[in-house]
Each structure stands twice: as structure tokens, then as C-alpha cells.
Image (cartoon, grey):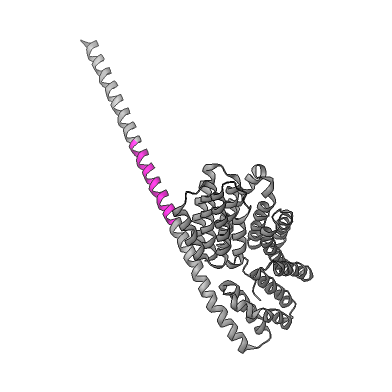
């Protein structure tokens, strides 16, 4: 069984949404409360219907005089919706607009929230250095300026993305330390409803790491906790991912029939959920099990579905990278043009300096020559 894609965009949909929702806002003006309520509600709509979320927020921006906080939240909401659609570069573009606005207004909570969001998008794109860059800035701000009411949730988000980044870039032993930190912070957070989605995701990722380290009993304990928490709160997708991860623990000890039993128990729900990446993970797991069981007919069926979906996912990722490459190329072109412009300026300065010096020397030479002539006379 292949490693579950820890960078799966669909898997991080709830994480993205909860980054945007927290903290719950307490406002005085009735109209402001109404707009904030709409934006918070739209964040939840974005989880299932990103196109509707984008349209609603765009209409809200066009017909209302939004304050700074609402402008930032609206940009992040649109970014979150694009992330759900797997358009990660668009998500980054909107988040960076929000970050610029937060910077201009010196809004530290908003700055950290946008930095975590951007770090998560770059993690999905596997651009690990960029992940660390944005999260390091977030940690510096957290160190001294973040309100105590939101500190645990925000720290949990930073530790979580660092954990999954280390999981991919280094190894699970390093990552588990950060997963434990994120789980600890999420558990301390005041807003338990907003927090529990991210907590279940952190538990699932820790369970996957423990499985990779063949600590299977510990992995099952963690994954069962994630399953129960997801079931209690109605987080279907997280529950499905927890069960797929549980199936992997049985695969790791060659118990392929038990692995299949777990998968078939959620097959109908997964098919009805209409999440491309989730289904891709699910069919990949089934295909791997049937290959090991030497049931080549069923392996052929599930591997065909898996490969078709994988091509669709890869196509979306290619489009995101294409945008990034174009952006990088534009930056490099601008840098070259600036460098050429600077070289031209330096060249002109050098020529002017040389000509000025030459003129000065000629002038001095003429003065000396004239003085010598006068002395001879």
C-alpha cells in the first residue's frame, strides 16, 4: 500500500476552513455582525461548494463597505475556496493580498493567520523551503504579540504544518515531536468546536507516521481516537481518512483481508462523497490489497479507477506549478532587466566620471603649458 498523500488538497480542506474561522468574532455594530456572520457561514459553504462561496464573497465585496478585518477575511475566504478547488496558486495570491493588508494595518493575529494559510498551500505544492520561510515569520510574531485567547489554536496550526513538512522532507521521528506539540496546543484551545477538526487531522497524520515507523498498536490507538472524534462531530471526510489509515496498519502486517474489510465498510459513503483525492486514496488502497492477495481481476478494476483519478489530480497540480513557473520566470526577467538597467546606469556614470576626469586633466595640462610659456616669455 502506498503512503497516503499527506499533501492531499482535499485532506486539508477542513484545515484550511478552520484556519479561516478562528477566532469567533465579537462585534458591536449590527451591520458588522451581519457581514461577519455571512463570511463565517460562507467559510463552511466553501468546504462543500467553493464556487458558491467565491460568488457570495465577491458579491459581498462589491456591495458593502468592508472594514479592514472583513476585507482580510473575505480575501482568505476566497483563497480557501480556491484551495478546496485545488487551485493552490490562486489561493496563495489571495492570501498574500490579505497578508499585505494585515501588515499595513499592523494586525498581528491576521498576519499569523495568513502566514499559516500560505505555508499550508506551499506544503501542498511540496515547496518545503517556502513553508519554513512563512512559518518561521509566524513563529516570530507568535513569540511576543499574539492575543492569549487565540495563542493555542494558532500555535497548533504552525506546529502542525511544520510537522507534515518535516514528515515529507526529513522523517517521521522528527515530525512526531511537532505533531505532539500541535495536538497539545489544539487540546488547550478555548474554541473546541473550531479546534476539533484540525485536531483530528493532526491525529491522523501522527497515526500515519507511527505506521511508517511500524509502531502499529500506537498508530491504531491514535487513529481510533481520530475516528471517534470525527464521528462524534460529523466530520465525514476525516473519518474516512482515519479508516483508510487504519487499513494501512493491517496492510503493514500483511493482514490484507482485514484491511479490505475496513475499506469496504466505508466504500459506499466514499463513493457518494464526491471527493476526487479521497476516492483516489481509497481505490489505491484497495488495489494494493488485491495485488497482494493475487486477485488480479479486482486489482485491475481498482487500479484502473485509481490511475484515471490520479491523472486528473496530476493535471490540477501541473496547472498550479505552471502558474508558479511563469511567476518565477517573470520575477527572473524583472531581475535581469533591473540588473541590465543598473549595469547601464553604472556604465554611464563611469563614462561621465572618466570624461570629467579627462576634461579636468586636459584643463590642468593646458594651464600648466600656458604657465610654462608665460615663464619663458
- Which of 233 and 187 lies nearest the eye of the viewer? 233
Relative to 248, say whether 367 is above or below. above
Q: Residue at x 55, y 78 (%)?
A: 307
Which quarter of the figure is the N terminus placed in? bottom right
Give the image location of residue 321, x and y in percent. 49, 63
Q: Is residue 351 magenta?
A: no
Q: What segment is highlighted magenta in the picture?
A: 328-348
Which quarter of the figure is the C terminus placed in? top left
In which quarter of the view is residue 119 placed? Answer: bottom right
Relative to 29, say whether 288 is above or below. below
Q: Is residue 323 visible?
A: yes
- Which of 46 and 355 lies nearest the eye of the viewer? 46
Relative to 131, say whether 356 is above or below. above
Q: Is residue 347 magenta?
A: yes
From the viewer's perspective, is 100 left or right of 170? left
- Which of 304 and 241 lies nearest the eye of the viewer? 241
Q: Main secondary structure of the magenta part?
A: helix
Q: Residue furthest left?
A: 377
In which quarter of the view is residue 214 placed? Answer: bottom right
How many labels, in total?
Answer: 0
Give the image location of residue 87, x and y in percent. 50, 64
In which quarter of the view is residue 192 placed? Answer: bottom right
Give the image location of residue 337, x and y in percent. 38, 48
Q: Residue furthest right?
A: 217
Give the image location of residue 60, x and y in percent. 48, 56
From the viewer's perspective, is 195 left or right of 335? right
Q: Residue at x 56, y 82 (%)?
A: 304
Q: Residue at x 75, y 77 (%)?
A: 253
Q: Residue furthest front?
A: 30
Amino acid at each position: 500500500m502506498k503512503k497516503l498523500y499527506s499533501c492531499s488538497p482535499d485532506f486539508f480542506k477542513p484545515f484550511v476552513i478552520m484556519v479561516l474561522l478562528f477566532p469567533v468574532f465579537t462585534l458591536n455594530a449590527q451591520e458588522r455582525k451581519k457581514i461577519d456572520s455571512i463570511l463565517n457561514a460562507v467559510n463552511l459553504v466553501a468546504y462543500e461548494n467553493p464556487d458558491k462561496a467565491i460568488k457570495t464573497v465577491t458579491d459581498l465585496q462589491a456591495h458593502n463597505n468592508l472594514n479592514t478585518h472583513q476585507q482580510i477575511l473575505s480575501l482568505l475566504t476566497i483563497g480557501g475556496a480556491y484551495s478546496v478547488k485545488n487551485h493552490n496558486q490562486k489561493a496563495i495570491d489571495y492570501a498574500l493580498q490579505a497578508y499585505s493588508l494585515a501588515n499595513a494595518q499592523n494586525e498581528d493575529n491576521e498576519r499569523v493567520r495568513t502566514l499559516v494559510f500560505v505555508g499550508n498551500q506551499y506544503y501542498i505544492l511540496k515547496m518545503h523551503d517556502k513553508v519554513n520561510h512563512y512559518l518561521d515569520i509566524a513563529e516570530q510574531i507568535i513569540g511576543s504579540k499574539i492575543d492569549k485567547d487565540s495563542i493555542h489554536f494558532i500555535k497548533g496550526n504552525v506546529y502542525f504544518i511544520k510537522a507534515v513538512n518535516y514528515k515529507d522532507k526529513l522523517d517521521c521521528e522528527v515530525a512526531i515531536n511537532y505533531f505532539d506539540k500541535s495536538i497539545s496546543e489544539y487540546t488547550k484551545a478555548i474554541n473546541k468546536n473550531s479546534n476539533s477538526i484540525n485536531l483530528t487531522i493532526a491525529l491522523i497524520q501522527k497515526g500515519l507516521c507511527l505506521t511508517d515507523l511500524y509502531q502499529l498498536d500506537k498508530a491504531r490507538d491514535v487513529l481510533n481516537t481520530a475516528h471517534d472524534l470525527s464521528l462524534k462531530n460529523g466530520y465525514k471526510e476525516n473519518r474516512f481518512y482515519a479508516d483508510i489509515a487504519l487499513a494501512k496498519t493491517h496492510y503493514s502486517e500483511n493482514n490484507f483481508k482485514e484491511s479490505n474489510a475496513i475499506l469496504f465498510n466505508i466504500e459506499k459513503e466514499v463513493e457518494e462523497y464526491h471527493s476526487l483525492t479521497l476516492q483516489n486514496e481509497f481505490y489505491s488502497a484497495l488495489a494494493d490489497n488485491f495485488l497482494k492477495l493475487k486477485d488480479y481481476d479486482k486489482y485491475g478494476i481498482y487500479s484502473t479507477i485509481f490511475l484515471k483519478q490520479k491523472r486528473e489530480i496530476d493535471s490540477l497540480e501541473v496547472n498550479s506549478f505552471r502558474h508558479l513557473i511563469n511567476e518565477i520566470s517573470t520575477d527572473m526577467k524583472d531581475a535581469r532587466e533591473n540588473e541590465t538597467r543598473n549595469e547601464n546606469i553604472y556604465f554611464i556614470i563611469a563614462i561621465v566620471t572618466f570624461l570629467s576626469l579627462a576634461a579636468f586633466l586636459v584643463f590642468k595640462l593646458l594651464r600648466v603649458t600656458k604657465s610654462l610659456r608665460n615663464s619663458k616669455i
